[in-house]
């Protein structure tokens, strides 16, 4: 019992506030404010840590998802590499490489020597026999031109594109092994380079040469049937990184979303935290896009022209990372949309103006429907009184749709956003059409 006879009330104020002196009440208020500030600071600290983790992991999550799709989804991988067979720069590089390999294995000097011996046996003048060796250069040029034309026809044909797709589809298992450092088939690691075996294409070219009348092409020995796709002294590190990203490809995106959601939940102001999370992730996506540009320059500098012409190397890089770029842009646009939505739900003057305009527009439309006899009655009244719940459900459904969409693009985000806004507008109009004599609906 206290000296005044009042029963102690624990940490809260006494039941009889008049039992406290003014100084005691000021001390009590100061303690409560201090406790509230400490609690608020802890929430801000937790929110900051969670947001920083989400920001740092978001680019890795995008890259991991892309890498996982390339090594686990055969259709996605074939869709990635298919354009290379139809890329002029790559076609020219393959044509030149195969032409040189074939011509280099033809013994032009042996042909001229045989011609000299035949002329000598036929009794040709010595001058003619000696000049027969001068035919080596023109003969090689003519052979190069003829072979180049035949090879070019094969490489630029639809049949080559189909062979390319089929070969890559069959080689997808080999690609998986390559990314884990165990490649031993069509796509494989050799030293500091990743190469693609073109054995099927070479055999097709040899058969085409025979069909064109070059019967001797059937006797051409096996040539180098590989073409370098990537060459770097960091291949081992890249393989280790790809293995890690493949493992984390499924869980990193979930982790980022969970961290951002926890940050929003822990923040004193949920709306502000949502905007901060969206803006931060958008900034990190811009950083990732810049990083891809820098990586492109590093890759092109690492591939010598003797291994792959610059234009072909550019086409290879741009083709391989185009889905990564698209995914990054998709996340960027989604983050911007979330940030704008968070702002429009806030107290800003611009947000209030937009809400007011849309509220008046949907309300006027609904009342016009009601006056024309298209009243929604109890259903419309329920929609109007539960506007916040229906809005939340629609937005949540849109978010789940995007998360479950297989490889969404910017166009997919725009489609989902448009449908969401349309559904919200329809619900608002139906709510406003429940009666004709009530005030304008809430924005």
Image (tube, rainbow, N blue to C red):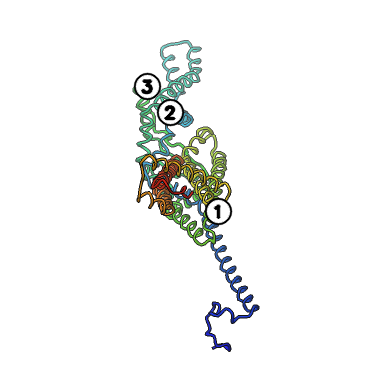
In this rendering, the label closer to the viewer, 3 or 1: 1
Calculate the distance from the C-alpha at mark 3 to the C-alpha at mark 1: 69 Å
Q: Nearer the viewer, residue 172 or 383?
A: 383
What separation in Å lies between label 3 and label 2 (alpha carbons)?
Answer: 12 Å
The numbered mark, 1 or 2, whose residue comes first in the sequence reads: 2
Residue designated by label 2: 102
The quadrant of the image that shows the N terminus is bottom right
The spot of residue 253 in percent (x, y) is 45, 53
Q: Nearer the viewer, residue 75 or 340?
A: 340
The residue under label 1 is 276
Say if 11 sits above or below 98 in the image.
Answer: below
Q: Secondary structure at mark 3?
A: loop
**Of the numbered discs in the image, which one, if any, rests on residue 374?**
none
Q: Position of residue 263 (x, y in %)?
A: 51, 59
Residue 199, position in %: x, y? 38, 35
Q: Is residue 104 above or below residue 18?
A: above
Q: Nearer the viewer, residue 362 or 38?
A: 362
Q: Neighbour class for label 2 at 10 Å: few (<14), some, many (≥20)? A: many
Q: Secondary structure at mark 2?
A: helix
Horizontal side of 44 relative to 145 (left or right) equals right
Residue at image mark 3: 214
């Amino acid at each position: 019992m206290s000296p005044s006879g009042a029963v102690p009330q624990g940490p809260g104020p006494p039941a009889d506030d008049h039992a406290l002196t003014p100084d005691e009440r000021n001390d009590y208020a100061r303690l409560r404010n201090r406790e509230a500030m400490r609690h608020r600071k802890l929430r801000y600290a937790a929110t900051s840590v969670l947001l920083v983790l989400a920001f740092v992991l978001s680019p890795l999550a995008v890259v991991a998802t892309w890498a996982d799709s390339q090594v686990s989804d055969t259709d996605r991988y074939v869709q990635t590499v298919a354009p290379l067979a139809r890329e002029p720069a790559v076609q020219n590089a393959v044509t030149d490489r195969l032409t040189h390999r074939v011509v280099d294995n033809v013994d032009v000097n042996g042909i001229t020597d045989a011609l000299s011996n035949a002329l000598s046996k036929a009794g040709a003048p010595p001058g003619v026999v000696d000049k027969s060796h001068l035919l080596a250069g023109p003969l090689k040029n003519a052979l190069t031109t003829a072979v180049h034309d035949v090879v070019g026809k094969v490489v630029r044909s639809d049949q080559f594109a189909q062979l390319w797709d089929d070969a890559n589809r069959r080689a997808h298992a080999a690609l998986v092994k390559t990314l884990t450092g165990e490649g031993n088939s069509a796509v494989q690691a050799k030293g500091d380079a990743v190469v693609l075996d073109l054995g099927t294409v070479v055999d097709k070219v040899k058969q085409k040469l025979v069909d064109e009348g070059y019967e001797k092409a059937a006797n051409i020995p096996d040539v180098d049937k590989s073409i370098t796709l990537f060459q770097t002294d960091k291949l081992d590190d890249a393989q280790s990184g790809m293995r890690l990203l493949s493992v984390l490809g499924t869980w990193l995106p979930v982790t980022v979303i969970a961290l951002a959601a926890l940050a929003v939940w822990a923040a004193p102001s949920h709306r502000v935290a949502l905007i901060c999370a969206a803006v931060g992730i958008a900034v990190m996506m811009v950083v990732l896009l810049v990083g891809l540009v820098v990586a492109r320059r590093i890759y092109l500098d690492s591939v010598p022209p003797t291994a792959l012409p610059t234009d072909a190397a550019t086409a290879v890089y741009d083709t391989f990372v185009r889905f990564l770029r698209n995914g990054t842009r998709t996340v960027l646009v989604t983050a911007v949309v979330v940030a704008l939505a968070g702002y429009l739900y806030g107290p800003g003057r611009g947000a209030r103006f937009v809400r007011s305009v849309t509220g008046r527009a949907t309300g006027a439309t609904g009342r016009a429907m009601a006056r024309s006899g298209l009243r929604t009655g109890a259903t419309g009244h329920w929609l109007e009184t539960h506007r916040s719940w229906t809005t939340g459900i629609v937005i949540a459904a849109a978010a789940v749709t995007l998360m479950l969409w297989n490889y969404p693009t910017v166009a997919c985000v725009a489609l989902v956003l448009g449908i969401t806004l349309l559904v919200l507008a329809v619900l608002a109009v139906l709510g406003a059409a429940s009666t004709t004599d009530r005030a304008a609906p809430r924005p």
